[in-house]
Image (cartoon, rainbow, N blue to C red):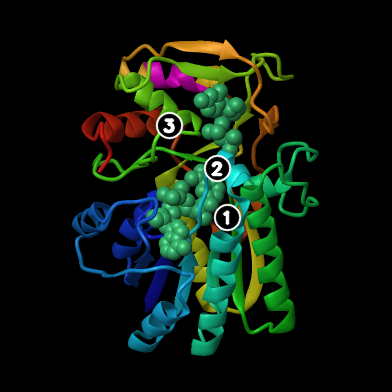
Amino acid sequence: MTILVTGGAGYIGSHTCVELLKTSYDIIILDNISNSKKESVDRIKELGGRDLKFYEGDILDRATLDGIFTENKVDAVIHFAALKAVGESTQIPLTYYDNNVSGTINLCKAMAAAGCKKIVFSSSATVYGSENISPLREDMPLGKATNPYGTTKMFIEQILQDIYTADNSWSISLLRYFNTVGAHKSGRIGENPNGEPNNLMPYITQVAVGKRPFLTVHGSNYDTPDGTGVRDYIHVVDLAMGHISALDKVLQSPGLDIYNLGTGKGYSVLDVIAAFEKASGVKINYKIAERRTGDIATCYADPGKAFEQLGWKAVRGIDEMCEDSWRWQSQNPEGY
Ligand code: NAD
Ligand code: UDP
């Protein structure tokens, strides 16, 4: 069977493609390389041990999509392609709505035209908003997103639900990711942010490698055990395996399912710094500062539904997440 992976050259997509190549699925990557490097595609092939098809193109370009569906018999799509920088989304919201929402609509139209109605979508824990109390469950009401990036994820979830309501021969999996960190054990692929990282782990690794002087800890007066924000960090290879479980289900029977992909455990910013220092042997300089706008105190998953229905659970702990993030960053200080 052949799987189209949009955004497959990116951080989570590249790790998922490596795991897909170890199964019997053939893969096609479509990526416009707006937030990734072509080098990652070569490394996916190297780690996966076999070939794949790569199209450099945009999900906003219907002709490109139609060409892919005509040239290949695509059985299902894993849809990672999106812009994901929260801060940037507040500066250029139209670009985010266009790329993420219009891009997904374009993709779904091309899929419907080709008779391919099976999709696994990258959603986010951000759809739970700030009011729901952790552990977060899939049946909780959606919250209000605090930025346009989060709103694109909510809109796309709604659009995919409406598509399924209108035509229940579709098979759709909405995967709500928690905080993805870590890298492939080889140190050959990993997260490669453009410019100053927004997220905690790449910031820590860049401080460790000497690219940044210190980490700013955003807030120390939250209602959490040590006052810093608590999140559910999940290893990217566990997340990749979750996609394969969701894909297997999507291919089996029509339906729409929503799954949290998280570990169910929360770690504070100071916990992550301590775990990273232990894993790397490098001291992380940090300064406590004000809270970051839009942040919440605590966010972690109830991952029970994915285990019950998909048989999937995360198995890699915080020490392994830190070791693997560090191996990637120290072996590739400038990224790809
Ligand atoms: P990433 O930026 O590394 O990967 C996204 C890929 O999509 C990039 O390679 C980029 O070049 C490509 N892309 C973007 N717009 C495109 C377009 N119009 N056409 C073709 N390709 C396009 O990001 P990631 O961290 O791997 O995230 C993958 C998905 O998971 C995204 O949808 C993101 O919103 C979602 N997500 C990520 C996290 C996280 O912690 N990283 C958490 C929740 C959700
Ligand atoms: N954080 C921090 N300094 C940074 C980046 C993040 O203190 O430079 C904190 C942030 O306030 C939150 C946690 O680390 O409590 C995770 O933030 P991240 O941006 O990685 O993910 P989010 O949960 O916001 O999507």
Q: Is residue 46 visible?
A: yes
Where is residue 284? Give x, y as percent: 40, 14
Disc 3 from disc 2: Cα separation: 12 Å
Question: In terms of image quadrants, where is residue 123?
Answer: bottom right
**Residue positioned 59% across, 73% down in the render:** 105
Disc 1 from disc 3: Cα separation: 19 Å
Question: Residue 306 has which mark?
Answer: none
> Which of pointers 3 and 2 lies earlier in the amino acid sequence?
2
Magenta stretch in the rendered image: 272-277
For badge 2, the amino acid type reads: Glu
Where is residue 262? Give x, y as percent: 57, 44
Q: Name the residue under label 1.
A: 96
Where is residue 311? Give x, y as percent: 54, 57
Question: Do the residues bearing badges 1 and 2 touch, measured as CB atoms within 8 Å?
Answer: yes
- Vertical arrangement, residue 127 with respect to residue 318, above or below: below
Question: Residue 196 has which mark?
Answer: 3
> Which of pointers 1 and 2 lies earlier in the amino acid sequence?
2
Quarter occupied by the C terminus: top left
The secondary structure type at the circle numbered 1 is helix
**Residue positioned 35% across, 41% down in the render:** 192
Disc 1 from disc 2: Cα separation: 9 Å
The secondary structure type at the circle numbered 2 is helix
